Amino acid sequence: MAVDAIGVLNNSAPIPQNAGIGQDDFLRILLTQLRFQDPLKPVDNQQFVAQLAQFSALEINRQQSEKVDTLLSIQGANQAIALLGKAVQTGAQQANAVGDVTAVSFATGEPLLTVTTPTTTFIDVKLSSVSLVR
């Protein structure tokens, strides 16, 4: 899950959920490799153990990445909640409007602000659109 932060532009494309290789995929590849290997030249034990160790390291990295994503989501929620009642300046979508944060919504899974100015109210303002907190 991509997480926006205050004052950060997020122009990167989202990574598809199926972009990585899972444990089942790895086991399927490994079994196929063992099934079709040359019986006269079997896979060396050291190579086999090295492949298992590499996959284990990849799985640990994937789990750590998920935990970091969770921490970033929590941090984004904390930032949004801390802005309640504060005056903020928003970015280009709201023409650099200055107003008070009156509500925070989590309907889409990411924090979206409601910014009220003297003339209008902007709904669903992303944290990345906030350029200044007063």
Image: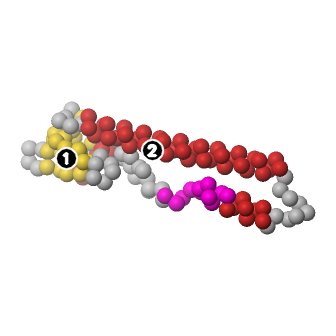
Residue 4 within the segment the image draws in magenta: no
Between residue 86 and residue 10, name the one nearer to us.
86
Look at the numbered disc 1 and give the secondary structure of its residue: strand
Residue 47 against residue 42 in the figure, above or below: above
Residue 21 within the segment the image draws in magenta: yes
Q: Which mark is residue 133?
A: none
Look at the numbered disc 2 and give the secondary structure of its residue: helix
Q: Position of residue 84 (x, y in %)?
A: 21, 37
Q: Position of residue 8 (x, y in %)?
A: 36, 43
Residue annotated with mark 2? 69
Q: Residue at x 24, y 36 (%)?
A: 83
Q: Residue at x 73, y 65 (%)?
A: 32
Q: Is residue 8 visible?
A: no
**Direction from residue 57 to residue 39 in the image, left or right:** right
Q: Which mark is residue 114?
A: 1
Outermost residue, bottom side: 36
Between marks 2 and 1 in the image, the one whose residue lies nearer the viewer: 2
| Residue kind at label 2, given as amino acid type | Asp
Range of magenta residues:
17-27
Graded by Cα atoms within 10 Å as few (under 14), some (14 to 19) or many (20 or more), the crowding at tag 1 reads some
Outermost residue, left side: 119
Q: Residue at x 56, y 56 (%)?
A: 20
| Residue kind at label 1, given as amino acid type | Thr
Q: CA distance from mark 2 to mark 1?
A: 24 Å
Q: Is residue 77 visible?
A: yes
